[in-house]
Amino acid sequence: MTNPDLLPGPLPSSLQLTKEGHLKHFLTVEGLPPLMLEEILNRAEQFVTLPNKTQRKAPLLRGKTVVNLFFENSTRTRTTFELAAQRLSADIINLDIRTSATAKGESLLDTIRNLEAMNVDMFVVRHQHSGAAHFIARYCAPYISVINAGDGRHAHPTQAMLDMLTIRQFKGTFAPLKVAIVGDILHSRVARSQIHALTTLCTGEVRVIGPRTLIPTGIEQMGVNVFHDLHAGLDDVDVIIMLRLQKERMQHALLPSAHEFYKRYGLTEEGLRYAKPKAIVMHPGPSNRGVEIDSKVADGPQSVILPQVTNGIAIRMAIMSMTMGSQSGKSS
Ligand code: NCD
């Protein structure tokens, strides 16, 4: 029997590859070959731009229409998908779910059918239910690509890939690295996708750190070591990834209080000293200062939280252009 904490169980990752092994949809990192992850990272590297430089548009998605379908709130993910589409010369529509027919009771499939009738080419989907992007990929028209921008607590594969790009930029190869993911692992789709990506890329050691109530039982099966003591878990690590407490997904009290959590698991300058001196600190955002991370660390010299955001555009450009079958990552 599958472990309910690791829900929703294996979704068919085969759905996202064509018979020839090309990326058709991007729904989950799970099951993708290491070479595919490296191809995404290499292609994204070509799209990384320096601050203050004029952004040149690549023509790879010219004539294509992308729909951002966000059924949940988002700042970074939605905006960077939008910028990525624009920098690939696509037309992009942001469907505002609150003012759409969904609010009048239209089913997800009906919404999809109506957007298909407008000849769109790609759906970028964020949904509160695990498996929503897989569902759309299965039932949408065959020429459409679907990208999962976060489904329930299942997966957030583009976030994981932008995190891998950031780790590779700051630390080089994955094999010698010790990476710790800290906090609310139980409700985090980001953590699940990061663990799949890190293990596929043969990271030396992946640790998860948090209270027993926020670590899924059986998570060791995913190839990670579990720690309940922050300082022991941070000992000698190269990368620290902090996660937000996902209170909106907690059905009952899993913690005494946010203050208590901060005392035991919040990353402060003192805690950071247990990691390697050049360890980097990451956070997918939105971060809650004083709950999982101290401002001095979030804004400190070891933080790479803002480079993560910048890399989100390059990663999303890479994945969008790959799913649309473009052959080159070079800009015009
Ligand atoms: C995350 C998400 O929405 O899953 N944020 C993000 O996409 N940058 C993490 C979170 O909500 O805590």
Image: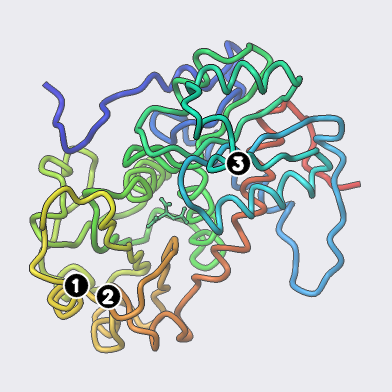
Q: Look at the numbered disc 1 and say if its residue's Cβ is closer than 8 Å to ligand 1.
A: no
Q: Position of 171 compared to 112: left or right?
A: left
Residue type (three-letter) at the residue carrying disc 1: Ala
Look at 50% across and 72% down and name the residue there. 304
In terms of depth relative to the viewer, which is nearer, 206 or 112?
Answer: 112
- List x then y, in percent, for residue 26: 54, 31
Question: What distance separates the C-alpha of mark 3 from that of mark 1?
Answer: 37 Å
Q: Which numbered tag is attached to residue 258?
A: 1
Q: Is residue 180 above or below residue 293?
A: above
- List x then y, in percent, for residue 162: 53, 53
Q: Quadrant of residue 94?
A: top right
Q: Earlier in the sequence, mark 3 or mark 2?
A: 3
Cβ–Cβ below 8 Å for labels 2 and 1? Answer: yes
Badge 1 crowding class, 10 Å Cα cut-off, few under 14, some 14 to 19, many 20 or more, is some
Query: Residue most toward the front?
Result: 104
Q: Which residue is mark 2?
A: 291
Determine the secondary structure under disc 1.
helix
